[in-house]
Amino acid sequence: MGYIKSYQHIFFDLDHTLWDYERNSTEVLEELVKKHRLTDRGIPSALEFSQTFEKVNQVLWSDFNKNKISRSAIRDQRFLKILANYQIEDNVLCNKLSDEYLMQCPTKPHVLPYTFEMLDYLKEKYHLHIITNGFDDVQYLKLDKSRLKPYFKTVVTSDSAGYKKPMASIFKFAIDKAEARKEESIMIGDNLQTDMLGARNFGMDHIYYNPSKLRHQASVTHEISCLSDLQHIL
């Protein structure tokens, strides 16, 4: 592993790194399919609906992170695009699904494996922080309902910073808010573009959380496939 720096501050991404976006989202979508009898409308199954949601959502969030679309565009377009996959044109249903999904999803409490074990381990040695491209109202609710909030000294969202990862400006904003220095800090996240590229361009060490062990050519400081691996680095 080589020489390990003496870090003082650890910055985590939230969604897909600590908060289990897939599991929480899937639970809500299953509930919505049942409540609104969507299988009667031509949707094969809740699983299929969830898979379609994931594909559409990934594209929209990628566009948002690249400043191609706004927050409202994600909310307005997401279920329109999903339902269009099943030839369903129903604005009333679309609005209901969007509103209920946005209300219920952030209240789901599931986190990724070893999240609490690692946070309990790390909090004794480091100051812990969050940097997320999510929205203030949604991300703070997730942190509260999942019982993650007490672990973090500061939380920086793209809303509060006025910048998005991978822009160096959001990392500078987070470092200043944490009263830290980048030389004594490290970023942990699941996204090679927003988290890893952003941290690298800012000059901050980083740990790529890659649970699916996706192949890539990116240069990263460290890479893990399970959060429990953090105890071998930090």
Image (cartoon, grey):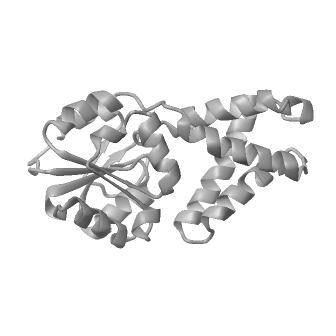
Residue 23, given in percent of the width and then of the height, sits at: 55, 32
Q: Is residue 67 left or right of residue 60?
A: left
Q: Position of residue 15 (x, y in %)?
A: 46, 45
State whether residue 42 is above or below residue 199: above
Q: Is residue 193 left or right of residue 52?
A: left
Q: Residue at x 81, y 49 (%)?
A: 94
Q: Position of residue 115 (x, y in %)?
A: 34, 32
Closer to us: 101 or 59 = 101
x and y percentages locating residue 6 in the rendered image? 8, 50
Image quadrant where one finds the C terminus: top left
Q: Look at the image and tell me whether residue 15 can be seen.
A: no
Look at 74% across and 37% down and name the residue there: 49
The correct choice, above or below, for 174 with respect to 99 in the image is below
Does the image show residue 151?
yes
Q: Please tell me which residue is depicted at 43% across the width and 60% down the height of the picture.
A: 194
Q: Is residue 119 left or right of residue 108?
A: left
- The count of marks equals 0
Would residue 65 be found to the left or right of residue 206 on screen? right
Frontmost residue, 124 versus 100: 100
Q: Is residue 130 above or below residue 32?
A: below
> Residue, x 90% and y 35% (percent of image)?
42
For the N terminus, the quadrant is top left
